[in-house]
Amino acid sequence: MFKSVFRKFLFSYLLVSIVSLIGISVVIGYFYQEQAYNQRKAALTKMAQRVNELTDMLIAEEITGREYMRNLRYLETEERVKVRLITREGNERIEGMPDRNTPPYPQGQFFRFERTGEMPGPGLDHIITRDTVSEVFQDKEKFLVRNIKDDQSFIVLGVPFKNGGDVERGVFLYTPIESTARTIERMYSNIGFTFLAIVLPTILVLYFLSKKFTRPLVAMSTAADKLANGDFSHRVNVNNKDEVGRLADSLNNMAERLQQLEQARRDFIANVSHELRTPLTTILANTQGIIDGVVTREEVNSFLKVNLEETKRLSLLVNELIELSTLEKGKMKLDKQITDISELVSDITRQMELKALEKNLRLSANIEEGLKGNIDKNRIRQVMINLIDNAVRYTPEGGEVVVSINREDQYIKIEVSDTGCGISKEHLPMIFERFYKAGDSRGSGIGLSISKLIIEAHNGRIWVESEEGKGTKFLIIIPL
């Protein structure tokens, strides 16, 4: 059911949203219901206090019984509440109050309460129970909901009033719960309608958001499949600036690098094939000529010398391939020892002077003396010869190659710069990749790859700075 990321996103968002909305609705409903009951309780409490005040005024003969009853009936009619007054002495009537049977006063407004007898008043014991009255006369205010029948419920409030230290009387009020219940029902209906009004748009919004979030993932999955099948030309078109966008950019960069490496691999195979074919063809032709007697005895030595040079070229190429494979597997063993690197670089520069002079180049050195480090001398020599040889090869006649070495903090810094043609920006990021050759450069394209691996094996770093038409600078740092 949830095999796709889109469905997982959509279901998770919907679940969280609906559960949150239900939780919020329940909490709002609960507090609204509590507030409705609390407001009703406050109104009834205020009314009970008014009844007690009227009773005190009646006893003090400040008002007549008729006025007393008229006020009670007004309160009952206005608030839709029934009022009952119970005294501790069990008085059936209060002095100054008309007889309860005298019209137009309703029967049962005041009644005698005896703890051992039945509570008087028609049906009253079903609403105000003896236990409720007992608790009120124990100085406990009671507020509760009583269900008389399935379709008849009442809110009941009992308020004790003291005279001295004892409860003298209790005022009991009860009212049908219908009005409050209707208010609460309307509230729940409003919450339900609001819930539906929010949920339906939320589902649509979450659907489109899930689509938006998963669309780049689907695109990246498609791109990854194409990469796995060897199609490095496919790119992910994602404009997001978030983590998904950065992941898409990384995937595109990986595809770009894989495409460049694949092209470099093909070029390498073509170049190596050419490099192998040319000397092999020369060796084969010369050897066949000697065997067939086409080559004269005087020419045999020169043909053999050509074969020897071509064999050396083949041997060098094969050795480079084997060395690159060894370095990439991390199996290279360094023969490190404390070496005067300044002296080593000076010796290499002097050795390369002849090759520079052959091209009418100036090869100069700017070397800080006495810099020593724990290095593999032969490997560093290999790197320096490769860098200087490349600089000489790609610098036109009359140009200059400068080799410098100095100390920077805890590192030895080596620079090989030239005034050659430079390297274009498109080639710079790939210059140290194996098999990669910039432009029409000759060679196998693995010399710089080997140099990079050697420097990294020394815990150092090598990089290149170049501007097309102005020259190139290779930089190396090696820890002391």
Image (cartoon, grey):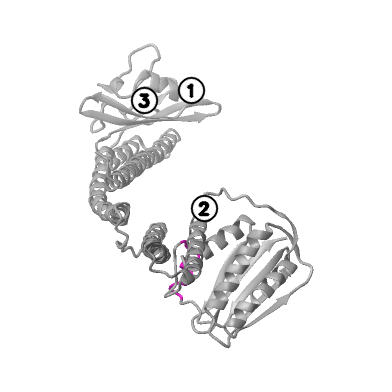
- Secondary structure beneath dot 3 equals loop
- Identify which residue is drawn at 44% across, 30% down: 141
Upstream in sequence: badge 2 or badge 3: 3
Residue at mark 2 to residue at mark 1: CA–CA distance: 93 Å
Most prominent secondary structure in the magenta stretch?
Answer: loop
Q: What residue appears at the point 34 percent right and 65 percent down from the top-left corner?
A: 239
Residue bearing the label numbered 1: 138
Mark 3 crowd level (few <14, some 14–19, many ≥20, 10 Å Cα)? some
The residue at the far right in this view is: 370
Magenta stretch, residue numbers: 425-434
Give how far apart the Cα atoms at labels 1 and 3 are. Answer: 22 Å
Circle 1 Cα neighbour tier, 10 Å, few/some/many (<14 / 14–19 / ≥20) = few
Q: Which residue is mark 2?
A: 328
Asked whether the beta carbons under mark 2 and mark 1 sit within 8 Å of each other, the answer is no
Specify whether 62 is left or right of 191. Answer: right
Depth check, mark 2 against mark 1: the one in front is 2
Left or right: residue 366 versus residue 56 is right
Q: Element under label 1?
A: loop
Residue 432 falls inside the magenta stretch: yes
The residue wearing badge 3 is 93
Element under disc 2: helix
Indicate left or right for 145 with 441 as reference. left
Q: Quadrant of the N terminus?
A: top left
